[in-house]
Amino acid sequence: MANIPMRHRANPLFILVGLVLILGGIALTVYGVAYIFRIMSGFDPFRGDGPPDRTADGATMAFWGIIVLTIGRYFWRGARRRGARDRFGRLLIISGYAVLGVALDRGVHAAVGLWHTSSAQSAQSAALNAVITFAIWAVPAAILAGIGLRLAKEEALAQAGVTARTWEKRVEG
């Protein structure tokens, strides 16, 4: 009976911070999606221009809500854990997710340039700009979160990715 692991009492401050962040993240996500629907309801696709640029603001608001919710879950899950290694790992995870939020924000706003392109070359340039903008922020975010996940012995609770495809018009003749 000497090797029975002792469960620590949950830290109420971590639970409270986690709960506030989870609820705030849910609210921000719902508001971001509702904002997109409100903007798009006034959009007329037959005018010939692309979707309004403000839809990117709604999308990034929803992304930030998901990031805040995820950070809240890490606080909640860390309420029972102890030790400097776990706390430092959680700090790195939270920092990584915050930088990932910046990557998603900047990437979405850079991708808005795709709506205003008139040629395949300008579309390719805008897509490359969006991917590079995202990658500049996402690579350090992945490194920070990866180190933190190993230190805290945690698992990734949210993930993001991006792919780029080229579309070619093929003429057979």
Image (cartoon, grey):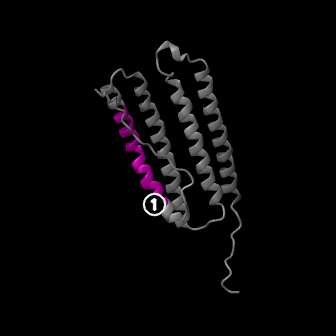
113 or 87: nearer the viewer: 113
Q: Mark 1 points at which residue?
A: 147
Query: In the rendered image, which quarter contains the N terminus?
Result: bottom right
Picture residue at 48% right of the left edge, 45% below the top? 100
Image quadrant in which you'd find residue 24: top right
Figure check: 150 above or below 44: below
72 or 104: nearer the viewer: 104
User: Residue 129 at x, y = what percent?
Assistant: 35, 34
46 or 23: nearer the viewer: 46
Q: Is residue 135 magenta?
A: yes
User: Residue 69 at x, y = what percent?
Assistant: 62, 46
Answer few, some or many: residues within 10 Å of disc 1's Cα (few below 14, many 20 plus, some between 14 and 19): some
Figure check: 6 above or below 46: below
Question: From the viewer's perspective, is 154 left or right of 12?
Answer: left
Question: From the viewer's perspective, is 132 left or right of 22?
Answer: left
Residue sticking out furthest to the top:
47
Residue type of the residue flagged with mark 1? Ile
Residue sticking out furthest to the bottom:
1
Q: Does the magenta stretch include residue 120?
A: no
Give, as a single range, the part of the protein colored magenta: 127-148
Picture residue at 62% right of the left edge, 26% below the top? 37
Figure check: 28 above or below 17: above
